[in-house]
Amino acid sequence: MAAGPPTPLVSFVPTPIGNLGDITLRAVETLREADFIACEDTRHSRRLLNHFEISKPLLSLHDHNEDRRIPELLEKARGGARIAVVSDAGSPCLSDPGHRFLRACIAHEIPYTVLPGPSAITTAVVASGLPPHPFTFAGFLAVKKGKRRRELAAALESGHTHVFFESPHRLVSTLELLSEINPQCRVCITRELTKKFENIYGGGPAELLEVFTAKPPKGEVTLLIHS
């Protein structure tokens, strides 16, 4: 009789992007069964775990220490420890820590699994009403204005719906750029998805520029554009 797949030692676990009720039963079970939880911010994750009455040793895993932390995590996994990897919100590896560790698991043949779950990316694509396929997720827009302009221009030329994470402090500047590059393009801005004050704004760049110039945005912002 053929052997089944090896039991995963490392699980990449999505966590709620706002509403705690969005966590999956499987995610809660995986976190409860883990020997260690690697998380982007231990204080942030501790609050989530306390809500679900989960008490586990936490290890920080973020952009600044991921390379240094990987050998320790691999050693624990080789010893049979079950490790759950979470980011502050949404799916690990997508503009969040975890990708380098996942690549290390592949390279060192450590069994791993990735759980489905909450993601601001797919939630925003559906909520926007823009064409859902093809869509391209491009992470955070560049801080420097010239590079940001080039990224936006290339996105609009592609014909795809493009999804970006953007700082609320730069959103007005980005809408100004879109108004210059293609004033007829379609824009959707989602703010605080799944949270109490969730907002979804759609329209042209000039229209939305007027909205956010009058009332600067706060919180988590996702920007979607389509030519």
Image (tube, helix red, strand yellow):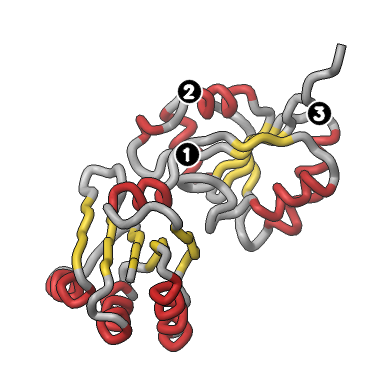
Give the structural element (helix, strand or loop) at label 3. Answer: loop
**Disc number for residue 15:** 1
Looking at marks 3 and 1 on the same chain, the residue that comes earlier in the sequence is marked by: 1
Nearer-the-camera pick, 169 or 59: 169
Q: Residues within 10 Å of mark 3 (few under 14, many from 20)?
A: few
Q: How far apart are the two marked residues, 1 and 2, measured between alpha carbons?
A: 11 Å
Residue under the point 23% across and 74% down: 205
> Picture quarter containing residue 32?
top right
Instruction: Give, as a three-letter code, the residue at label 2.
Output: Leu
Q: Is residue 155 above or below residue 131?
A: below
Q: How many marks?
A: 3
Q: Are marks 3 and 2 in contact (CB under 8 Å)?
A: no
Question: Can you identify the residue that label 3 sits on?
Answer: 80
Question: Can you identify the residue that label 2 sits on?
Answer: 25
> Picture quarter containing residue 218?
bottom left
Residue 182 location in percent, x, y? 29, 81
Residue 27 visible? The answer is yes
Looking at marks 1 and 2 on the same chain, the residue that comes earlier in the sequence is marked by: 1
Residue 122 location in percent, x, y? 41, 48
Q: Residues within 10 Å of mark 2 (few under 14, many from 20)?
A: few
Residue under the point 45% across and 36% down: 48
Q: Is residue 116 above or below residue 215?
A: above
Give the structural element (helix, strand or loop) at label 1. Answer: loop
Nearer-the-camera pick, 174 or 66: 174
Residue under the point 44% across and 58% down: 135
Q: Is residue 98 above or below residue 78?
A: below
Q: How far apart are the two marked residues, 3 and 2, measured between alpha carbons?
A: 24 Å
Where is the N terminus found, in terms of image quarters? top right
Horizontal side, residue 140 vs residue 196: left or right = right
